[in-house]
Amino acid sequence: MKIAPLFIALALAAAASAQPELRAGISRVEITPSAFMTMYGYANRKCGPANGTHDPLYAKALVLQAGESRLAIVTLDLGSIVSENLRRDVASKLNIPVLLLAASHTHSAPSFLPYGSSPSSDAGAAAYLAELEAKVFRAVQEASGAMFPARLGVARGSLQLGYNRLLLRDDGRARALFDNLERIPYGPVDPEFMLLRVEDTEGKTRALLVHYAVHAVVLGPTSCKYSADYPGVMQSRLEQDLKDVQVMFVQGGAGDINPLFMGRSGVEEQDFKVMQTMGELLGAEILRANGKVELLSPAPPSIRSRSEVLSFRNRWEKDKTVEVGITTVLINGQVAIAATPGEPMHKLQRMWKEQANVRYPFFYGYTFSSGGAWPGYIPDLRSAAFGGYGADAGTEIEVEAGEKIVLQHLTNLYDLLGMWRDNPGKP
C-alpha cells in the first residue's frame, strides 16, 4: 500500500522534469563603422560624412528557447536594417527560424541601405553591411551557445517625452513640425513604455528590453558624430545602475512622434547635453518601473509564431508594389509581439494594443523579420487622409496598408491562441 504513493510521486516528478523549460542567452557586439560614412536620415545634413564617434553603436542579441522552438531578438543602433543573409543564415546554421532585427532608428548612424533596400552601388556601404551581418551572426551564435534556464517578467510605465509632429493647419491639411524647441506636447501620442525582463532561475536579471515610441532624433542635422541618440544614453544609464544587465531598446510606432527634447543649437556639446537629459529622464522612469515587474505565470513555456510577406500597391505608382514582411510571436500565451518593418505611426501601435487578446501586447516597429523590403513610412488611415510628411509626402505604401498589417497581426495572434474553430460555437 505504501508503494503506490511513492510511484505516483516519482511519476509526477518525472513528468515535471520532462516539461520544456524556458532558456535564454544574451550577447552584444559593437557595430560602429571603422570609416566615416554618410550619415543616416536627414536630407539637409550640414556636415556630410561623419567626422567622429560620440558614443559607440551596438547590436545586442537575446535568444529564447522553449522546447524545440527558438527565437532571436537583435536590437541595433541603426536607422534601418534589412538582411536576407542574416535571416537565412540564422535559420539554417543556428536552427533559429525566427529572427527579429529591430533598429532604434537613430539618425546618427551610418547610411548603408538605399530606399527600398535594393542592392547598394556604394562599395563602402556594401562592405559595412557585410561586416555588420558577420558581427550580428556571431552575436546570435554566442547567445545561442550560452543558454541558461530563465523566466520572464513584464512591467509598464508612462512618460511623455514625445509630441505628434503632424499638425493640422488653417487649410485643413496636416504638415509636419520637425522642430519643437518650446517643447509643446502636441498630441496624440502613446506615452506608455513596456519592459520585458529576462531573469535566471535564481532571480538575477540578465536582460531588460525597453519598448518605447519616440523618434531617435534628439540630435539634429548639424550633428556629425556617430551616436545611438537618447536610446543609447538610456541603455548606458540603466546598465550602470543595474550592473551586469544587458539593456536593449526596441522602437515602437514612432513614425509621427518626435522627441520633446531636441538639440538644435548647432553646438555639439550643448546638443549632446540635451540628448543626455532625455535619455536619463527615460532611464530614471524605467528604473522605477523595473521595481514593479510581474513575472509571467508558471505555465509550461512556449514560443509560437507566424511570418509572412504582405503585398500592397504603391500609393502613387499603381503598377508597382510594396512588399512588407511581418512576424507575429506569442510567448507563453501571455506576451505577443507584432514585428513590423518601416516606420508605422503610433495609432497602429494603439490599435494592436487595444485589440490583442493578451495581457502583454508589444508592437515592434522598425523591425525586419520575414523578407520583403523596408517600406518606409506606414501611416494610419486618418493620417494618410490629412497628409503631411510620412502621411502622404514621403510615403509610398497604399492607404489602409497600416490597418491591414495590424489586422493580419491580430488574425495571426488569434490563430496562435487557438481561437479559430472548425465549426461554429454555441449560439
Image: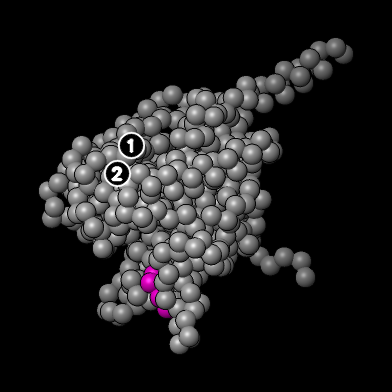
Q: Secondary structure at mark 2?
A: strand
122 sits left or right of 146 in the view: left
Q: Give the image quarter of residue 32.
A: top left
Q: Secondary structure at mark 1?
A: loop
Q: Which residue is mark 2?
A: 226
Q: Nearer the viewer, residue 274 or 246?
A: 274
Residue drawn at x 46%, y 51% as measured from the top left: 251
Query: Which residue is outermost to the right?
Result: 1
Query: Which residue is outermost to the top?
Result: 2
Q: Which residue is mark 1?
A: 56
Residue 389 within the segment the image draws in magenta? yes
- Residue 198 position, x and y percent, is 56, 33
Label 1: few (<14), some (14–19) or many (≥20) C-alpha neighbours in 10 Å: some
In the picture, the quarter occupied by the N terminus is top right
Residue 274 within the segment the image draws in magenta? no
- Residue 413 position, x and y percent, is 56, 56
Question: Is disc 2 in contact with disc 1, using a CB cutoff of under 8 Å?
Answer: yes
Label 2: few (<14), some (14–19) or many (≥20) C-alpha neighbours in 10 Å: many
Q: Earlier in the sequence, mark 2 or mark 1?
A: 1
Residue drawn at x 77%, y 21% as measured from the top left: 8
State how far apart marks 2 and 1 are (Cα): 7 Å
Residue 303 visible, this orientation: no
Give the label on residue 286, or none. none
- Residue 312 position, x and y percent, is 37, 71
Residue drawn at x 26%, y 63% as measured from the top left: 43
Q: Which residues are magenta?
A: 386-390
Q: Nearer the viewer, residue 264 or 7?
A: 264
